[in-house]
Structures are given as C-alpha cells and as structure tokens.
Amino acid sequence: MFRQFMLLSTLCLPIFWAASGAAKTPSIDDYRVGVVRYFFEPMGNFNSGDMLVRMAEPGERSRVANLSEKRGKVLMLTFWNRTCQLCRRNVRKLHALQEKLGKDKLEVIAVHGAFDKPFARVETEAEQFKVTDLTIVQARGRQLWQEMQNRIQFELSSNYPPTWIIDTKGDVRFLSDLAMDWANTPEVVALVEALARGEV
C-alpha cells in the first residue's frame, strides 16, 4: 500500500508543479504583443530621475524640478515643438490615454524641443493643446537636451515622434517611434497598467 502511494505521488507531483507553474509571475515578454513588439528597449540603464527640467504645473510659476518627483506612476515622455504637426498630434493622443487611465496612474510629460527659449514662450505655444492638465517641460540646458535626444533616441531610431515609457521607479523601459491612437490600442493599455501595478 505504501509502495502504491509513493508511486502515485511520483506520478502526480509533475502534474501539480505544471499546474502551479501556470500561475507564474508575468514578465514583460507577456506584454510584448501586437504593436508593443515594435517598441525598442533602451541601451543600458537610464533613470529619468537624474534629469533636471524646467516645468510648471497648472497655476504654478516655472521652476527647475527633478523628474524623480514623478516617481510612483508611469510616465510617457514625448518631444514636440511648434512646427512638428505629427509630434503635436502624438501629444494629444498620449493625453487621451492619460485621461483614460487617470493621472494618478499615468502622466504624460511633453518636452519642448527648444532648451534655450524663455519658458513663458514654451507655455504660450503649449496653449494650442487646449488641455489644462498636460505637464509641459523644457530640457535644462544643451547638454541635457542632447542626452535626452541622443542616448535614448538616435541609438535606436531617428524617427519622430519619439516617446519614452518610464516605469514607477523612474527607469526608461521602452522607446516607441510610432504615432498611434494610444488610448484605443489594447496592448498598450495593458502594458501601462501592468507597469503601474509594478508587475513587470
């Protein structure tokens, strides 16, 4: 009887392990489906918390801030300027995703393409977006602007508009150079929600 029990246990354990393995912790590869499979992974570690930018929340005067202030939520950081229509359209589409998921979970950071303009002019140009909760920033000096552009963007792709996807710890996880309807792309929504939960 004991021998039969041991034999049965030996046969059942692999089945139990296989079943328990079905509930494994998700990995980022589980979310690399659909359009997400075309996203680039940045070369080397890059933490956005090291970046000083000039910014102003709605109702604030401009100030120099560190993007580490934004940790705890997913950031989607994209670049734009007054003349790039595709970039401006991308900002609007990203903002629609922020509206869908909530700013407590996802915040869009719109980086103006000129580091040397007065910030008041940047804010004036940003009025074209006609939204009150869009975070507009400006790179703090030429060196930072070049690092933001070159290290993340041009090593991988020189297409516009570039968008970084940054996790809750401030680490840049993906670069996308696709202009898309972000809010209505289910695989993107699933990825952002998983990053917001800290699952991947």
Image (spheres, rainbow, N blue to C red):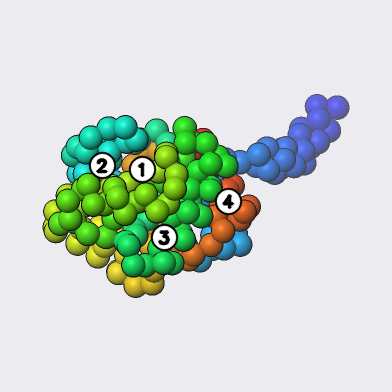
Give the residue pinned by disc 1: 135
Residue 50 is at least partly visible in this image: no
> What residue occupies the far right of the structure in this picture?
1
**Does residue 106 appear left or right of residue 170 in this picture?**
right
Q: Amino acid at mark 2?
A: Met
Q: CA distance from mark 1 to mark 4?
A: 18 Å
Which residue: 68% across, 43% down?
22
Give neighbour class at mark 2: few <14, some 14-19, many 20+ (Cα, 10 Å).
many
* Image coordinates for residue 129, horizontal then vertical, percent: 42, 51
Gap in angstroms between the C-alphas marked 4 and 2 = 25 Å
Q: Nearer the viewer, residue 18 or 197?
A: 197
The circle on residue 88 is 3
Query: Are the two marked residues, 1 and 2, in contact with CB atoms closer than 8 angstroms?
Result: yes
Q: Residue at x 32, y 46 (%)?
A: 136
Give SS at disc 1.
Answer: strand
Q: Are marks 3 and 1 in contact (CB under 8 Å)?
A: no
Q: CA distance from mark 1 to mark 2?
A: 8 Å
Using the rendered image of the protein, determine whether residue 101 is visible from the camera's viewpoint: yes
Q: Name the residue that disc number 2 marks.
A: 55
Secondary structure beneath disc 3? helix
The amino acid marked with disc number 4 is Ala
Quick one: label 1 or label 2, which is nearer the N terminus?
2
Do labels 3 and 2 touch, CB within 8 Å?
no
Q: Quick one: SS at disc 2?
A: strand
Q: Label 4: which residue?
A: 183
Q: Quadrant of residue 54?
A: top left
Residue 110 appears left or right of 66: right
Q: Earlier in the sequence, mark 4 or mark 2?
A: 2
Q: Residue 186 in the image: state x and y as whole percent.
A: 63, 52
Amino acid type at mark 1: Thr
